[in-house]
């Protein structure tokens, strides 16, 4: 549920003003996912899911260490 909320926030938050302002998701997709050039959409989706999983793993590790 939190992952879905995170993606929705990425899509909703716009950087700049106007109708054509890029969202955080667009910036992430164009800048971060460039690491895997010329990937088909299936592998790009897998890469996004893996990055999301690693982010949540880091959050859980930090919370565990503070316990």
Image: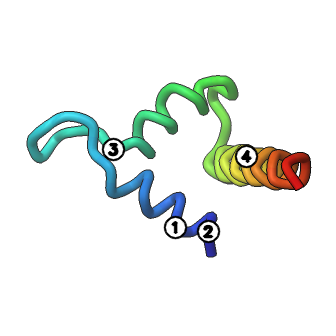
Q: Which mark is residue 23?
A: 3
Do labels 1 and 2 touch, CB within 8 Å? Answer: yes
Mark with earlier residue (2, 4): 2
Q: Residue at x 80, y 45 (%)?
A: 58
45, 58: nearer the viewer: 58
Mark with earlier residue (3, 4): 3
| Label 4: how many Cα within 10 Å (few below 14, some 14–19, many 20+) | few
Q: CA distance from mark 1 to mark 3?
A: 15 Å
Do labels 3 and 4 touch, CB within 8 Å? Answer: no
Q: Residue at x 69, y 51 (%)?
A: 52
Do labels 1 and 3 touch, CB within 8 Å? Answer: no
Image height check: is 58 above or below 67? Answer: above
Mark with earlier residue (3, 2): 2
Q: Position of residue 24 (x, y in %)?
A: 40, 42
Q: Quadrant of residue 12?
A: bottom left
Which residue is farthest front?
A: 67
Residue topped by disc 4: 55
Screen quadrant of the C terminus: bottom right
Residue topped by disc 1: 5
- Under tag 4, what secondary structure? helix
Q: CA distance from mark 4 to mark 1?
A: 14 Å
Q: Position of residue 36 (x, y in %)?
A: 69, 28
Q: Position of residue 38 (x, y in %)?
A: 63, 29
Residue topped by disc 2: 2
């Amino acid at each position: 549920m939190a992952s879905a909320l995170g993606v929705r926030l990425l899509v909703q938050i716009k950087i700049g003003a106007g109708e054509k302002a890029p969202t955080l998701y667009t910036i992430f997709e164009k800048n971060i996912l460039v690491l895997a050039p010329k990937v088909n959409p299936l592998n790009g989706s897998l890469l996004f899911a893996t990055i999301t999983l690693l982010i949540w793993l880091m959050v859980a590790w930090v919370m565990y260490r503070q316990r």
